Image: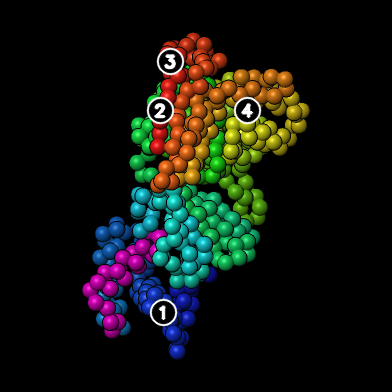
Amino acid sequence: MKLSDRIIKGAARADQPNSAQPAQDQYYALKTRVHLGLVQLLDLAAVAELPKEALAATVREALQAITTKERLPLNRQERVKLVADLMDEIMGLGPIEGLMADPGIQDILINGYQQVFIEREGILQRTPIRFRDNDHLMQIVDKIVSAVGRRIDESSPMVDARLGDGSRVNVIIPPLALNGPVISIRKFSQVPLSPDDLVRNQSVIPEMLTFLNAAIQAKLNILISGGTGSGKTTLLNVLSGFIPGSERIITIEDSAELRLHQPHVVSLESRPPNVEGRGEVTLTDLVKNSLRMRPDRIIVGEARGAEVMDMLQAMNTGHPGSMSTIHANTPRDALARMEVMAGMGPTPLSEQALRRLIAGAVDLIVQLGRLSDGRRRIVSLSEITGLQDGQTGLQEIFVFAQHGVDDNGRVLGELRGCRTSPRCLSHLRACGQDLDEALFNARTTVN
């Protein structure tokens, strides 16, 4: 159904006689009526191309004409609010546009048209914001997915997309979502976090970053592991900043989120099948193709399927310094998940062969955790030490030890080195990274 048809349908419902709607519903009915007038008066497709200031002036003029003609009882403050809301509808994401502009909000979660939650400082809060109805919410969904060339309908009711600012969006609609469209938006800061920001937020200690910088310069392969919302992509962005600007970097993602600032970056993005079920390009296809593109580094946004096998083979066959993320609760779980995903490939390997492949490919695992107070922190930095009695050996280099929780619910603990020199230290030194072994004795209390 077209946007104008939905507006007309909504206006028809709003103008039904004997309606006993609350004040907010009456406002939505009024806004729908005025929006319908704008659709009839203006060519919204052409107007939306205007600069924001010119668009605001055009909408104000049209609104003045409509309110005068319809004799709507609006004071100056109500008229300003109506113009702002209509601007958000035409140029932005409607009722949640203000939430998108708030830098303190990390997540926006929409459960049908009546429930909008946000995450601020790691805590979920419900907002008073709502949409007119599920049709109104679907208008916003259509705007999001169409902007990145994706589609969503009953035959394809789930989609991953991204907004213009890089924010990640997941949408699931009926018939899979029983109470209306469900939207999950993971916002990304307009100013990317720097290593100093991570230290300031007590997510890491300087000694960790010094070691990780040396590992990246020496082209060790790094896997970033963590649960949902633990900050894997954020950390991957930060660590990618340590890659020298002279190298050719290829990023491979389902939905492009990484923002690297080196001069030679090639960004690849997978593609879902079209309406006829054709044209799909998977991460596996992109990883295979990237090997023919003369990469110095390959960065896979998230390892989640059969592409793990191709990524491991790339790490083992002349493409060191690669990085990726994976969903797992511990470093040991990350290894187990890699075994399972590598086994999804067309070439079956024995358990021992898979473990030997992983142990030879991955050098370091950085484990992230989202603590009970909502803060994100590196809770373990481990190196893989090869196969030992048929099991992949892991040695912790740095670890976070939690001691308790204070009266305000903040987690107390200590980020510290494990007082053991990593086996890769000789390789780092051979690559010109002369680290002081006292680095691994560091201890910093965090709260």
Question: 301 or 337: nearer the eye?
Answer: 337
User: Which sits earlier in the primary sequence, circle 4 or circle 2?
Assistant: 4
- Residue 241 in the figure: left or right of residue 112: left
Residue at x-position 40% and y-position 47%: 408
List the residue tagged with mark 1: 22
List the residue tagged with mark 2: 444
Asked which colour scheme the image uses, the reply is rainbow
Stretch in magenta: 71-97
Bin the neighbour count of mark 3 within 10 Å (Cα to Cα): few under 14, some 14-19, many 20 and up. few
Give the farthest residue toward the front. Answer: 407
User: Which sits earlier in the primary sequence, circle 1 or circle 4?
Assistant: 1
Question: 368 or 409: nearer the eye?
Answer: 409
Residue at x-position 26% and y-position 59%: 53
List the residue tagged with mark 4: 312
- The rendered magenta stretch, by its main secondary structure, is classed as helix
Residue at x-position 49% and y-position 52%: 169
Query: For the residues carrying marks 1 and 4, which lies nearer the camera in this image?
Result: 1
Question: 344 or 439: nearer the eye?
Answer: 439
Tell me the element at label 3: helix
Position of the C terminus by quadrant:
top left
